[in-house]
Amino acid sequence: MSRVVQKKNHWASRVRQCSLTRGPGGQLGFVLLGGAEHGEFPYAGAVVGDGEAALSEGELLLEVQGVRVSGLPRYDVLEVIRSCKDPIVVKAVRQGEGTSAFPALPCTGEGMRR
């Protein structure tokens, strides 16, 4: 007999695609934070401007116009965005409980003292 395997709630099922359009000042409506130089995925910071951003605060950027940006430094992600024409297609995933891109590791303090 075969066993029924329950699927775990994987973050890949929460990836969403959205289309961004620059405002009159050339902004996309959010601040880009993080990046490989900080050991993080690039993510959407605070929403800026009068309108609503298509991305919400804290969403991780995975792709911009088909280019994977998840391991790039922030300045490279900004260059990818600058080189795109409107509308800019972005794949992103919302962070949440159990969906963190950086799983918590136990901190024992060993090897921390030098």
Image (cartoon, rainbow, N blue to C red):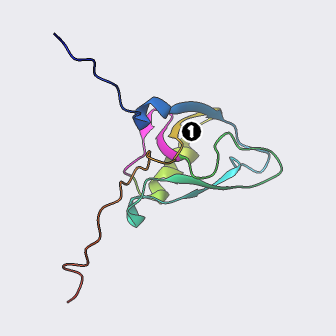
Q: Which residues are magenta?
A: 60-71
Q: Residues within 10 Å of mark 1 (few under 14, many from 20)?
A: few
- Image spot of residue 27 (x, y percent): 70, 50
| Residue at the outermost bottom position | 114
In the image, residue 94 sits, relative to residue 36, either above or below, namely: above
The one of 51 and 80 positioned closer to us in this rendering: 51
The total of numbered circles placed on residues is 1
Q: Which residue is mark 1?
A: 84
Give the residue displayed 39% in from the left and 64% down from the top.
37
Check disc 1 and report its element: helix, strand or loop: loop
Where residue 4 sits, quadrant-wise, is top left
- Image spot of residue 52 (x, y percent): 76, 44
Where residue 11 sits, quadrant-wise, is top left
| Residue at the outermost left position | 1
The C terminus is located in which quarter?
bottom left
In the image, residue 61 sits, relative to residue 49, either above or below, namely: above
- Specify whether residue 112 is painted magenta: no
The one of 74 and 105 positioned closer to us in this rendering: 105
In the image, residue 15 sits, relative to residue 59, either above or below, namely: above
- Image spot of residue 1 (x, y percent): 16, 10
Where residue 103 sits, quadrant-wise, is bottom left
The one of 102 and 104 positioned closer to us in this rendering: 104
- Image spot of residue 46 (x, y percent): 67, 57
Give the residue displayed 61% in from the left and 35% down from the top.
85
Which amino acid, by three-letter code, is at mark 1? Cys
| Residue at the outermost top position | 1
| Residue at the outermost front position | 1
Give the residue displayed 79% in from the left and 53% down from the top.
49
